[in-house]
Image: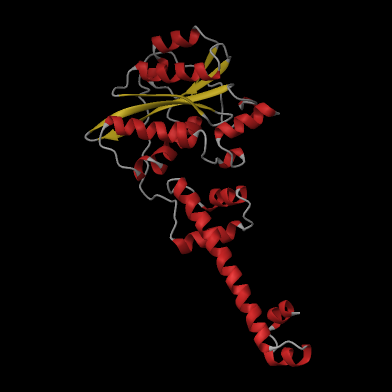
């Protein structure tokens, strides 16, 4: 009865209800106080869980991923409520610093591989882990210079299966990343490896390495970064979620940040919207259990 009374107060005076339904004013106010206290405590608990999830993501999770975190903890709350509370708490995952894409040099006379993997064609999409890998290179600012990072991503699981860092853009940079990737997916695995037309990926040493393994090379169209959008998007996430939010002054500190992002955070813990909000490793484990 008191719940009905509370819901109708905006339409009918409290005194009328108390008189006709045998509810005392003091009883109603005690119930309302308890109800407000429960609501306040619940909101506090939800807000603490939100702050914990946001903090553990290094301030990178928006409301959808935080909401999924809270679901995993058994907290019953809507995504809109999480978004509202995050605004109240001043938690904003968006980073307004501009991300600038760095592409490799494609002005060379080395052979160009056929584009076997096409992001716009579902028939070329992998059906399981280790079928299609994609790689690229980006620069990481260090003082007045740069350190270069090459990664190899499994398109199916979005896991970074290989990566390497060097001070120069020589072919060994990409060879080390792909070699690490092949050790992880299986040295004899038959894979398609997709990249841009950079000179490192078209070099004789690189093509020789791939010819000695069951690796079919695939390359993007000239000047079309969309063809390798999975890796470009990953680079953007790395910089906006991690590097722009942390300070480093030495190559050793930079390498530690990259290791932490890839091996500790991204592969094992970061929820991926394209993977039903599982991490790449979790998604791979679910696939293996089917």
- Residue 206, placed above or below residue 7: above
Q: Is residue 287 left or right of residue 52?
A: right
* Percent coordinates x, y for residue 112 in the rendering: 45, 16
Q: Position of residue 135 (x, y in %)?
A: 46, 25
Residue occupying the point 57% across, 48% down: 69
Front residue of 170 and 35: 35
Horizontal and vertical percent for residue 166? 32, 23
The residue that appears at 49% across and 33% down in the rendered structure is: 229
State the image coordinates of residue 284 (x, y, percent, origin top left): 60, 29
Quadrant where the C terminus is found in the figure: top right
Q: How many marks?
A: 0
Q: How is the image coloured?
A: secondary structure
Which is nearer the eye, 150 or 55?
55
Residue occupying image coordinates x 34% and y 43%? 246
Q: Residue furthest left?
A: 144
Report the quarter where the N terminus lies: bottom right
Viewer-nearest residue: 258 or 197: 258
- At x 45%, y 61%, the residue is 89
73 over 154 or under it: above or below? below
């Amino acid at each position: 009865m008191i719940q009905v009374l509370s819901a109708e107060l905006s339409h009918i005076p409290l005194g009328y209800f108390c008189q006709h339904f045998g509810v005392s004013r003091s009883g109603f106010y005690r119930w309302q106080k308890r109800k407000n206290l429960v609501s306040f405590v619940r909101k506090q608990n939800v807000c603490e869980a939100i702050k914990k999830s946001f903090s553990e993501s290094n301030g990178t999770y928006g409301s959808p991923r935080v909401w999924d975190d809270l679901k995993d903890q058994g907290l019953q709350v809507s995504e809109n409520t999480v978004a509202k509370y995050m605004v109240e708490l001043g938690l904003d995952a968006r980073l307004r610093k501009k991300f600038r894409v760095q592409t490799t040099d494609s002005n060379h006379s080395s052979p160009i591989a056929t584009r076997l993997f096409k992001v716009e064609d579902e028939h070329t999409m992998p059906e399981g882990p280790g079928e299609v890998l994609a790689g690229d290179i980006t620069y990481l600012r260090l003082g007045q210079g740069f350190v270069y990072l090459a990664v190899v991503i499994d398109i199916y699981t979005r896991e970074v299966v290989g990566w390497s860092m060097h001070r120069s853009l020589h072919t060994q940079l990409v060879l080390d990343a792909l070699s690490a990737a092949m050790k992880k997916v299986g040295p004899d695995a038959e894979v398609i490896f997709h990249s841009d037309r950079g000179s490192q990926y078209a070099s004789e040493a690189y093509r020789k390495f791939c010819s000695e393994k069951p690796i079919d090379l695939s390359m993007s169209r000239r000047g079309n970064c969309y063809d390798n959008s999975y890796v470009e998007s990953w680079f953007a996430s790395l910089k906006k979620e991690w590097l722009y939010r942390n300070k480093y002054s030495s190559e050793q500190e930079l390498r530690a940040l990259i290791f932490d992002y890839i091996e500790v955070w991204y592969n094992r813990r970061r929820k991926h919207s394209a993977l039903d909000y599982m991490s790449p490793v979790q998604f791979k484990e679910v696939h293996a259990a089917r």
